[in-house]
Image: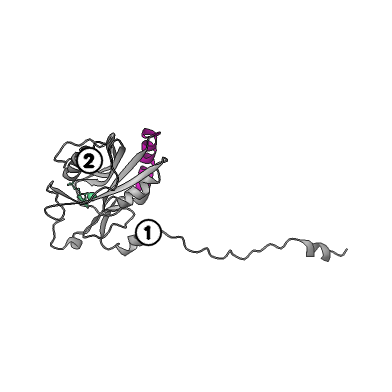
């Protein structure tokens, strides 16, 4: 029997390996760039993203039916705010404030200078202030006092990090993602000398990075 016809009609199976897919953009590139500077990863990128998912869902539930305005405190909160806002399934508006505190590089004196004010009026609005880290709490306390004078309908805070036990003023923070020991940390928006903000995790720096400076 001639089987050549059947053989010819069989679908051809391509066993050669698929062409390599183009490399995906990854958040990990800065990790290798700064690998020698990092002492310890305190909160991994996965932990951050998973917590932001939870907090975003809580905010979505709490503010359902409202017209929420997120206010980010520059510069530190920009990375957190970008991710958090995309886990809040509500129509949102955005505004930003930039502040700097007088005093030593990493210690707040409590006197805060507003470098960039809001573009929106917040009277009668539901406002959620998004902060990177609460250390002494003096910056946040000043900001809340300032914003309250503008008569928002509601004013709450969502902070990525809160250092345990070092706040000098009582603060009511509705959403706190992580409590950390009172150490100086960088990454995920937080800087040392304007660097390290683009790390996808939060970590501590090796002492050599500080040189003679006291963090
Ligand atoms: P506070 O007024 O002492 O709460 O300081 C708040 C501000 O200080 C934050 O918004 C940060 O900009 C900065 N800061 C406080 N702790 C750290 C840290 O561990 N790493 C980086 N920046 C910090
Ligand atoms: Mg800040």
User: Residue 122: image x %, image y %?
Assistant: 28, 40
Residue on which disc 1 sits: 28
Q: Looking at the picture, does residue 102 appear above or below residue 20?
A: above
User: Looking at this view, is 121 or 31 the one in front?
Assistant: 121
N-terminal label among 1 and 2: 1
**Residue at point 12%, 54% (across, down):** 104
Relative vertical location of residue 21 with respect to residue 116 in this rendering, above or below: below
Q: Are marks 1 and 2 in contact (CB under 8 Å)?
A: no
**Secondary structure of the residue carrying numbered label 1:** loop
Q: Residue at 32%, 49% (x, y): give it.
A: 80
Where residue 89 appears, as percent x and y from the top left, is 42, 41
Q: Helix, strand or loop at disc 2? A: helix
Q: What residue would you read off at disc 2?
A: 147
Q: Main secondary structure of the magenta part?
A: helix
Labels 1, 2: front one? 2
Q: Between residues 155 and 10, which one lies in front from this camera angle?
A: 155
Residue, x 19% and y 41% (percent of image)? 146
Task: State the extent of the magenta-drawn residues as a range.
Answer: 47-65
């Amino acid at each position: 029997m001639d089987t050549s016809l059947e053989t010819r009609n069989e679908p051809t199976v391509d066993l050669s390996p698929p062409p390599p897919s183009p490399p995906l953009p990854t958040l990990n590139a800065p990790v290798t760039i700064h690998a020698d500077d990092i002492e310890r990863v305190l909160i991994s990128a996965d932990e951050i993203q998973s917590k932001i998912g939870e907090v975003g869902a809580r905010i979505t539930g709490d503010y359902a039916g409202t017209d929420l305005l997120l206010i980010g405190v520059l510069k530190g909160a920009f990375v957190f705010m970008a991710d958090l806002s995309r886990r809040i399934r509500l129509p949102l508006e955005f505004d930003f404030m930039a502040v700097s505190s007088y005093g030593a590089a990493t210690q707040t004196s409590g006197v805060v200078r507003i470098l960039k004010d809001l573009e929106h009026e917040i009277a009668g609005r539901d406002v959620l202030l998004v902060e990177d880290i609460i250390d002494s709490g003096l910056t946040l306390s000043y900001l809340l006092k300032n914003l309250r004078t503008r008569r928002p309908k509601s004013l709450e805070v969502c902070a990525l990090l809160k250092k345990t036990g070092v706040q000098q003023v009582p603060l009511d923070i509705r959403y706190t993602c992580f409590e950390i020991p009172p150490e100086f940390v960088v990454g995920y928006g937080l800087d040392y000398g304007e660097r390290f903000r683009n790390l996808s995790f939060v970590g501590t720096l090796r002492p050599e990075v500080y040189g003679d400076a006291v963090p």
